[in-house]
Amino acid sequence: MPRPPKPDFLVQYEEWTKAGPPKCCHTCDHYAGDGTCFIFKMHPPIEFVNSQGQCESWSWEVPF
């Protein structure tokens, strides 16, 4: 008996995980808990912080 096809929710999940986290300040390794950007040494404006794909310095490194 052949393996059944993956359900839609699993296909959607796999696509979501391939994309990685949203590229915004909140997911960036350079963004501190107090809202400071380590790269630019300042608090970015809230409109920038909550936008995706705005910063060329965004980074999400593997922790090992």
Image: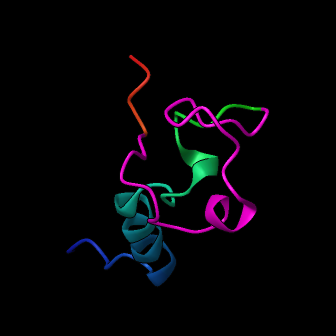
Q: Which residues are magenta?
A: 34-59
According to the image, what is the colour scheme of the structure? rainbow
Residue 12 part of the magenta-drawn span: no
Question: How many numbered markers are drawn?
Answer: 0
Q: Residue at x 62, y 63 (%)?
A: 48
Q: Residue at x 44, y 65 (%)?
A: 53
Q: Position of residue 11 (x, y in %)?
A: 39, 75
In this rendering, the answer to whether 2 lies above or below 39 is below
Residue furthest bottom in the image: 8
Residue furthest right in the image: 34
| Magenta stretch: dominant secondary structure | loop
The image quadrant where one finds the N terminus is bottom left
32 horizontally vs 17: left or right: right
Residue furthest top in the image: 64
Q: Position of residue 33 (x, y in %)?
A: 75, 32
37 horizontally vs 5: left or right: right
In the foreground, 16 or 3: 16
Q: Toward which corner of the image does residue 49 lie, by quadrant?
A: bottom right
Q: Residue at x 66, y 51 (%)?
A: 44
The image quadrant where one finds the C terminus is top left
Residue 39 part of the magenta-drawn span: yes
Q: Residue at x 53, y 43 (%)?
A: 28
Q: Position of residue 60 (x, y in %)?
A: 43, 39
Q: Position of residue 38 (x, y in %)?
A: 56, 29
53 horizontally vs 2: left or right: right
In this rendering, the answer to whether 12 lies above or below 21 is below
In the foreground, 5 or 33: 33
